[in-house]
Amino acid sequence: MRILGIDPGSRITGYGIIEKSGNRLTHIDNGPLVTKSSAPFAERLKQIYDGLSEIIRIHSPEVVAVEQIFLSRNVNSALKLGHARGAALLAGVNANLPVFEYTALQVKSAVVGFGRADKQQVQQMVRALLNLPEIAQEDSADALAVAICHAHSGGLNQRLADLAKVR
Amino acid sequence: MRILGIDPGSRITGYGIIEKSGNRLTHIDNGPLVTKSSAPFAERLKQIYDGLSEIIRIHSPEVVAVEQIFLSRNVNSALKLGHARGAALLAGVNANLPVFEYTALQVKSAVVGFGRADKQQVQQMVRALLNLPEIAQEDSADALAVAICHAHSGGLNQRLADLAKVR
């Protein structure tokens, strides 16, 4: 199963693609999509949407995993982040992909083993789990982390979703 | 010039289409797009995006006007609204339409004549300005109001945008 993880942001959106076969995870690609700060806001949303749509076209993931947002930020940044996240979710659903969301706690627990891990610990564990030659850029590492989180819990979520459909 | 006004919301997104010829405004269409509250959030964003894309396909507006958000809400609702607004802006830019944003103050000033007008006053003035047979649904009236705002100030914004390009 090929998983696209996304860490949305209005300035930088990280993406990460991993392949899961059995219990083995393989790194396929990752990177930050950086929007032009000089562009109008609607245009930046299009850059996020188009960038992710292109990644989906190139790598053909079967599922998208996005981190749910923790709400300790201020209202203005929550609003901006909401726009970026909306663009990211749409790139997924418009490509007819199932979209799963995970809390930061779930992601950190899945990747590092405890929910209060810091950024550096996440980056280090992502590197170790995927045998990366070096540490990934911060947002890209977060995107790979949420993809890994889905790889570990995806089966369970899928079964729950299937159960919900049957009812 | 045909203008699509949008009042985005994660539950109800209002849209309004007006035609401006000279100083005359004609009402074309309006309505609320209601998302299924039972659907997953990403799916609801797709309903907003697809609904507005369909409206754009049917009515071929030349420009989109969206109300900027006033930030007195709490972080959680700002975040949700951001997602919905992101989907609305994307429907516009993905149809290659210029997207303009107006503050609530600008919209109310343009439609009612003063910035502290309440919802009912906006609905009444929208009805009067567009000769509607009855008062439009609240979100649809807000969408028509932002379209009217653009009709009144659109020329100015366009000239400013053109000036900015020349520089």
Image (cartoon, coloured by chain):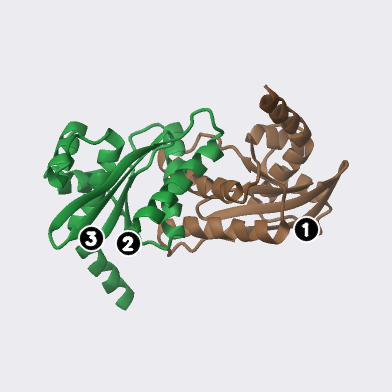
Chain colours: A brown, B green
Tell me if B112 is positioned left or right of A12 in this view.
Answer: left
Residue reaching furthest top? A167
Labelled disc at residue A79: none
2 or 3: mark nearer the eye: 2
Question: Pointer 1 and pointer 2: residues touching (CB < 8 Å)?
Answer: no
Q: Nearer the viewer, residue A24 or A127?
A: A24
Pointer 2 residue: B62
Q: Earlier in the sequence, mark 2 or mark 3?
A: 2
Q: Amino acid at mark 1?
A: Glu
Q: Quadrant of the C terminus of chain B?
A: bottom left
3 or 1: mark nearer the eye: 3
- Disc 3 chain ID: B
Residue shown at 19% from the left, 52% from the top: B26
The image position of residue B59, as x and y in percent, is 34, 55
Q: Amino acid at mark 3?
A: Gly
Q: CA distance from mark 1 to mark 2?
A: 48 Å
Q: Secondary structure at mark 2?
A: loop
- Disc 1 chain ID: A
Tell me if A27 is positioned left or right of B66 in this view.
Answer: right
Q: Nearer the viewer, residue A144 or B162?
A: B162
Pointer 1 residue: A134
Q: Amino acid at mark 2?
A: Glu
Q: Secondary structure at mark 1?
A: loop
Q: CA distance from mark 3 to mark 1?
A: 51 Å
User: In the picture shown, does residue B78 fall above or below A128?
Assistant: above
User: Crowdedness of circle 3 by 10 Å Cα count: few (<14), some, many (20+)?
Assistant: some
